[in-house]
Amino acid sequence: MLFDKIAKTTDGVSRRRFLQAGAAFGGGLMIGWVDVADAEPGSAPVAAFTPNAFISIDRDGKVTVISPSIEMGQGTYTSLPMLVAEELDVDMSAVGVTHSPPSDKLYGNPALGGAQLTGGSTSIRGFYTPLREAGAAAREMLVSAAAAKLNVAASELTTADGQVIHAKSGQKIGYGALVDDAAKLPVPAKPALKSPDQFKIIGTPVKRLDGREKVDGTAKFGIDAQVPGMKIAAIAISPVFGGKVKSVDEAAALAVPGVVQVAKIDEAVAVIADHYWAAKKGLEAAAPQFDAGPHASLSTADVVAALAKASERDGAVAKKEGDAAGALSGAAVRVESVYENPFLAHATMEPLNCTVHVTDSGCDIWVGTQIPSNAQLAVSEALGIDRDKVRIHNHLLGGGFGRRLEFDFIVLAAKIAKQSKDPVKVIWSREEDIQHDMYRPYYYDRISAGLDDSGKLVAWNHRITGSSIMARFFPSSFKGGLDIDAVDGAIELPYDIPNFLVDYVREEPPGIPTAFWRGVGPTRNAYVVESFIDELAAAAKKDPVDFRRQLTEKSPRARHVLERAAEISGWGTPMGERQGRGVALLYAFGTYLAEVAEVTVGKGGEVRVDRVVAVVDCGQVVNPDTVAAQLQSGIIFGISAVLWGEITLKDGRVEQSNFDNYRVLRIDEAPKIEIEIVKSGEKPGGLGEPGTSALAPAVLNAVNAATGVRLRRLPLEAAAQSLRSA
Amino acid sequence: MINLTVNGSKVSVPVEGDTPLLWVIRDVLGMTGTKFGCGIGQCGACTVHVDGSPVRSCLTQVSDVADREVMTIEGIGATKSGKAVQDAWLALDVVQCGYCQSGQIMSAAALIEMTPEPTDTDIDQGMTGNICRCGTYVRIREAIKQAAKAAAGK
């Protein structure tokens, strides 16, 4: 898996961390990680206030989990506290959750090379054990404190519902009364963890801790930050990537009531005002003009032509087994295809925004970010101030999907706010948000395979050509020209294929910034691989489910989800005219998932997804309701992309601008979704992304079943012509 | 100065008459539950009620709501239908990132107020203007049905 590889290739993994406890400010127990450089295991607790930790327990017994991962809808503010509550033996009603401050050391995800980053479906995978250990250690310390207080052996004590219980004498002490004593005790080096049969919380459908605030309007997203004296800014960024500001009518802007200042940086103009509407009107009056720069004539066709040409080059080998070329040339049947993935925008519901106050004492930033520590560093470098003077106040994210893994908008806001004496909230219009996204890259895939006389798959050759996000984002992981995200989902297939070659050619689109998008490599690759598997099934004259089943002999978990999805969906039962059923099988993020989609193709070629069946084996489940929610979410997200998702370029500019021309699925277009979760004690897998990754190929295969047309370019809307009924 | 009533309180706001109600609510009154999503009435995140009807506050000029009753997410829980919707949302754990949900709840509350027993078609029509990027639609549909029953005392 991708992120295991990052962990092996970045410095972070060499970091040794262990749990350390201390007294909380104003009394109470805190427990969290400490870096090996800062202390030794088993050392005395830190006497002073410990600001950074995973868990804080106050004198009322209230438990606060300082979440290393940020909440952006995926339910991590419920599932991570569940891990703590389970081992600590407290009821979920006694648990709260807060954002963590920036620190790779203290909140870095072990599944991501120790980076404080929420992404790649890694929150549970990275923190499943560390947060349970933190909870278990705190529990043991509370028990030790109670043993001393009651003058009994710790072995006579049990815990439940936030209390230490001495059954013999009938005495009970709440955790709150023990925290000050516990904070003085050493942290157990190897706290005992519960076995799965002892779980009371893990594996149950606990309600979201952030539910109430999100139904009554009190939840605070970055855009809701309110700082005394704050002004609001509207921005215009050069419509052509790489362009610069040429002129601004500052006087006209300042003449608009409520406008207080015009700020310029190289590529953008900001108008700062008392409220957003005044800022927006001021920006219109300012009528900024831009020098377009070197990419003034760029079009999507230019990008695709360059990728097609680059795909003729030999790539960096990602995986090689046997002799793919030899087996291909000797195959009875050869199939060869080219698949293309379009550029995509993230279009989070909350448009990009960031509030910054630059003062003599540093810089305060109120924002929702998936990557607080790196954002802190980037602002420190951009403004030339010490890193510890950049204070990031994280917020709930109104959607992330990878967009808030980037800090371009945070640095931009900091540069603007530096020109103002007041705190400034920079709000991007939806048009700016879509036209200055960092896009999922355009990818160009050449894929070929060979079947023997019996229709058995004997050779596989897949070349992936496109932008390398990793080379920019995780440079230390980019070695020998290989981007491990670009090939993720293409090299560890759930299938047994004897002669196998996957390689990668890096080709950057000129000027277009690229970034991760929900499902990262596996979303792009599953679309190619699982569409192509259907092409091979057709060439072998086999049913798509049967063809896959035969290839999964060595992957029983994959085979099981495939068979269950086929059964539940009624695979093979008749459907109506221009209706079809398609399947996709995925192994990614440590999770096995099969999706069956049913579609109806209208006379004009418009596609409607009527039903999706998803069967998932993600190992040990923490919260089954979250698993279901994330699959529903991933499926809907995937449908928007497969039906309509496409960012195109003309004259160096993005042609789409808002939800009217960058369509996303609405409630009346949403399918029925049926989900089955496989009971498993295997290692937990990721869930935020697989639902999206498997969706596109399932839909494309269903469209093929309905119409006989095989589409190798997305979105479907762009291919409607070829799907019209005769 | 423009006078209006927000969640039962009379307020006067010193803005130009063409200022969208959304920015008056958020930036002038400091009530942040109502969200900005698109600015062109395409996403529904900014939905509020004016005299009981759902409107997109990003496209509603504040001068048009002078002396009228505006209800936002901060006030909707005090109404029978609003509370029923919020309760159903919690019971089914509808929310994910939550950003669109103020608008979803305002639309849903208006829907069951006007259509006490909404069919799937009613829900499609009443809710199609509210986008959710997290894809909570399956649960929104169920929660509206549950809320409608609760509001009707069934």
Image (spheres, helix red, strand yellow):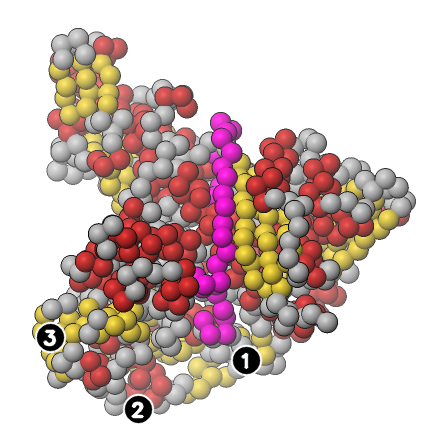
Depth check: A679 or A619 in front? A679
Percent position of residue A142, x then y = 22, 23
Query: What amino acid is at disc 3?
Result: Val
Percent position of residue A90, x then y = 25, 29
Report which residue position mark 2 lands on.
Answer: A252
Q: Is residue B41 above or below residue A452?
A: below
Residue A670 is one of the magenta-drawn residues: yes
How far apart marks 1 and 2 lie (CA) works out to 26 Å
Depth check: A97 or B106 in front? B106
Q: Which residues are magenta?
A: A659-688
Q: Is residue A207 visible?
A: yes
How far apart marks 3 and 2 lie (CA) works out to 31 Å
Q: Is residue A533 left or right of residue A57?
A: right
Image point 75% across, 39% down: which residue? A497
Q: Is residue A120 visible?
A: no
Residue A373 is one of the magenta-drawn residues: no
- Badge 3 marks a residue whose secondary structure is strand
Report which residue position mark 3 lands on.
Answer: B11
Depth check: A23 or B3 in front? B3
Depth check: A444 or B38 in front? B38
Task: State whether discs 1 and 3 lie on one chain.
Answer: no
Task: State whether discs 3 and 2 lie on one chain.
Answer: no
Query: What amino acid is at disc 1?
Result: Gly
Q: Earlier in the sequence, mark 1 or mark 2?
A: 2
Q: Residues within 10 Å of mark 2 (few under 14, many from 20)?
A: some
Percent position of residue A294, x then y = 58, 78
Which chain is home to disc 1? A
Q: Which mark is residue A50?
A: none
Image quadrant in which the C terminus of chain A is located? bottom right
Which chain is home to disc 2? A
- Badge 1 marks a residue whose secondary structure is helix
Report which residue position mark 1 lands on.
Answer: A293
